[in-house]
Amino acid sequence: MAFLDREHSVADSTFTRWLVPPAALAVHLCIGEIYGFSVFNVPLTKLLGTTQSVAGDWTIPQVSWLYSTALILLGLSAAVFGKWVEKNGPRKAMFTSACCWGGGFLIASLGVRFHQFWMVLLGYGVIGGIGLGLGYISPVSTLVKWFPDRPGMATGMAIMGFGGGALIGAPFGSELMKRFATPTSTGVMEAFLVMGLVYFCFMVFGAFTVRVPAPDWKPEGYVPSLVQKKLVTHAQVSADEAIKTPQFWLLWAVLCLNVTAGIGILGQASNMCQNMFGVPKAVGDGFAGFLSIFNMGGRFLWSSTSDYIGRKNVYFIYFLLGALLYSLIPFTQHLNNVTLFVAITAVIISMYGGGFATIPAYLKDMFGTMQVGAIHGRLITAWSMAAVLGPQLVTYIAEYQKARHVPAAQSYNFTMYLMVGLLLAGALCNYLVKAVHTRHHHPGTSTVPLTTIPKQP
């Protein structure tokens, strides 16, 4: 298996860097299925009864642990294995991710076959969750090194795939269950089996395609600017040193607060639309799918914009514009204007996705490229925290409001104002981000500006 080693994946002079984003997309589109896992929720509660739940079938609260566990393991595995990914390179990390993600589906398929919930949890939640973490961070530092001139655009292209994975995974899973369903089976076992094999193949394609640049490689015609910028370092900071800096924890809070606000709407989009405007469930579900498109598109659009206006500025847009838009959501309900509500939430979700895609470039600016993948892995534990906080805040506060006999249409209003507060807190954290002190720089690196070199096209 030596061909998986980093030294065997160094690109030669004929390799084009534009093959790296498709390789990253091949992985992220597969692991992005996690966003569409909800299509399996109800079928997993009818494995014994087939058409309805019977005694011995699993419950929705049980099944929800599969999704939650996978996301928790995503953050933990990214944090734990980040340095391993940097050391061994993207090919070995992406191949390992393919084995865990595809293999996790196969184990979950066996768990469904024998109706053993612990096997499904082990396969999809634990092993699959580790595959999620490895697959999510493995292309990041490689893309930043291939695209030093456009790091925001490069990471946006890859992470866009994760946001769009549900657009493929959800209908793919639904169609497979329909094809394999019988009077005595929901088709989940066979769907898991096929998805595991298909995802493994696509992810292996990405692993075999990806390359790392030679140490002295630079894009043709590109001359790195040596002009010192406030928040763009020419030095390098190790992952172990980065977590000792206040900048790391401020950016951790920035990501956590941005994601908490966005995921609260994304996770409850269908219910919100139904309760606030009285639309049918089918319309609410369609609205949730519609938001996924903006989640995906925002990852590329906003992260690419950050290459021109700076990471700190684009996060100010996320927080300040987002706070304004959240404060307007109760107003849309008061007007009973569904169109305005959809437009506002679409922009909010685009900035939610943009936050994910912009953070790797922000980290590169602050800490350099030496171990940016490992630093990113540790930072996205903020996502694990937000994945718990966001949906719980929206759900429980709405239920509390209903228990106090607040009309269902108005039960989300207080939550929206709470999100405004979270976003303003995020803006404050972003404001406090300053350049990393030189005492944290890796020995032998420098931030001293030598000359002014015009920016290359």
Image (tube, rainbow, N blue to C red):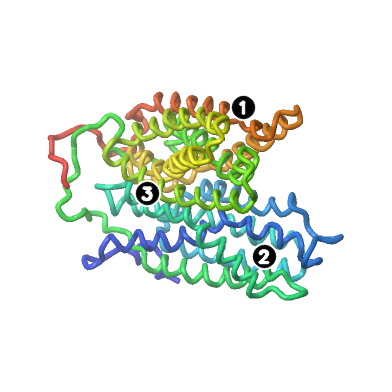
Residue 389, percent across and down? 61, 36
Residue 118, percent across and down? 74, 59
Closest to the camera, between mark 2 and mark 3, is: 3
Disc 2 is placed on an element classified as helix
Q: Nearer the viewer, residue 136 or 277?
A: 277
373 up-or-down from 328: above or below: below
Report how far apart the C-alphas of labels 2 and 3 lie in the structure: 33 Å
**Observer able to see residue 239:** no
**Which label sits on residue 300?**
3
Give the residue drawn at x 45%, y 71%.
1
**Which label sits on residue 52?**
none
Q: Which residue is mark 2?
A: 108
Q: Which residue is mark 1?
A: 414
Disc 1 is placed on an element classified as helix
Give the residue drawn at x 21%, y 65%.
13
**1 or 3: tag closer to the N-terminus:** 3
Give the residue drawn at x 44%, y 56%.
161
Amino acid bearing label 1: Phe
**1 or 2: tag closer to the N-terminus:** 2
Residue 45 lies in what quarter of the image? bottom right
Amino acid bearing label 3: Phe
Do the residues bearing badges 2 and 3 touch, measured as CB atoms within 8 Å? no
**Observer able to see residue 5:** yes
158 up-or-down from 444: above or below: below
Residue 42, percent across and down? 71, 58
Label 2: how many residues lie within 10 Å, few (<14), some (14-19) or many (20+)? many
Q: Is residue 151 left or right of residue 419?
A: left
Amino acid bearing label 2: Ala
Residue 435, percent across and down? 33, 29
